Amino acid sequence: MNKPQSFFHLHLISDATGETLLAAGRAAAAQYKDARAIEHIYPLIRTEKQLTKVFDDIDAEPGIVLYTVVDEKLAKRIDEKCLSMGLPCVSVLEPVIAVFQSYLGTPAGRRVGAQHVLDADYFRRIDALNFTMEHDDGQLPADLEEADIILIGISRTSKTPTSIYLANRGIKTANIPIVLGVPMPESLGTAQKPLIVGLIASAERISHVRENRVLGASPGYDADTYISRATIAAELAYARQICTRHNWPMIDVSRRSIEETAAAIVALRSKTR
């Protein structure tokens, strides 16, 4: 018998965007299936005045406090305030920084938002995102050679979200749909530089996703055929045939998150470079 789901408040205080903190908090909260975190995110907290307002909110809805604040004075203030309120409080970055300092033999620079500087790596990610958006769903097939990775697969195999996730890591990613009986672009077969990966899934999983898709009312649209498992099985067989013919690796996304699929693709890319 499943336990009823409980809720708790999770307060996330960051002196930058809060992305690192949010990822850490969600990773920890995901381990508790019967408890759901109500997230309160406080980004760009860099002054005592801002912090006072944050703790007014925390006082109204007490819970776990996580923070990433590199200013030692503000960090100490958070620790002291949580102690006085009897709330659990953790500096997410501090243990990691301590390890770095011990190993490198030098103190951290304590730069706020240092991971978000406008450097070459940042602009490489922006360039990758632009490329990926321009090459979504089979667009601009003529210059596929410029891609780092090309994802192919039938409808609803998570090609677009996986492409965008990879682009956020600076990897230029194009994606091309596989349609039953329709030849793939010639430029795909001649591409030498990109890693080409086929995304597949079980017919059951794809049918379920398609059933929940918000569909347009375009003339001639056959919803029954679109979600038919027999049709989907035929589409998947066609996709496997294409990948096998060209010796392109395939990844089954049936039980993978977008992040797990992307990690598997990056691992494949490392082996083939």
Image (cartoon, rainbow, N blue to C red):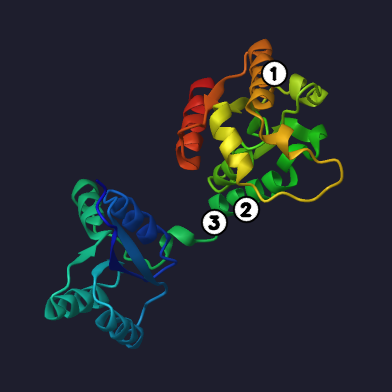
Q: Can you tell which of label 2 and label 3 is closer to the viewer? A: 2
Q: Residue lying farthest top? A: 245
Q: Dot 3: what SS?
A: loop
Which badge, 1 or 3, comes first in the chain's sequence?
3
Amino acid type for the residue under numbered disc 1: Tyr
Name the residue carrying label 1. Answer: 238
Which badge, 1 or 2, comes first in the chain's sequence?
2
Question: Is the C-beta separation of discs 2 and 3 under 8 Å?
Answer: no
Quarter residue 174 falls in: top right
Question: Is the C-beta separation of discs 1 and 2 under 8 Å?
Answer: no
Name the residue carrying label 2. Answer: 126
Left or right for 167, reference 136? left
Q: CA distance from mark 1 to mark 3?
A: 44 Å
Q: CA distance from mark 1 to mark 2?
A: 34 Å
Amino acid type for the residue under numbered disc 3: Asp
Left or right for 239, reference 255? right
Left or right for 35, reference 177? left
Q: CA distance from mark 2 to mark 3?
A: 11 Å
Of residues 180 and 158, the one nearer the viewer is 180
Pick the quarter of the image with the C terminus. top right
Label of residue 119 in the image: 3
Categorize mark 3 by other alpha carbons within 10 Å: few (<14), some (14-19), many (20+): few
Of residues 96 and 101, the one nearer the viewer is 96
**Can the viewer see residue 273?**
no
Q: Dot 1: what SS?
A: helix
Q: Can you tell which of label 1 and label 3 is closer to the viewer? A: 1
Which badge, 2 or 3, comes first in the chain's sequence?
3
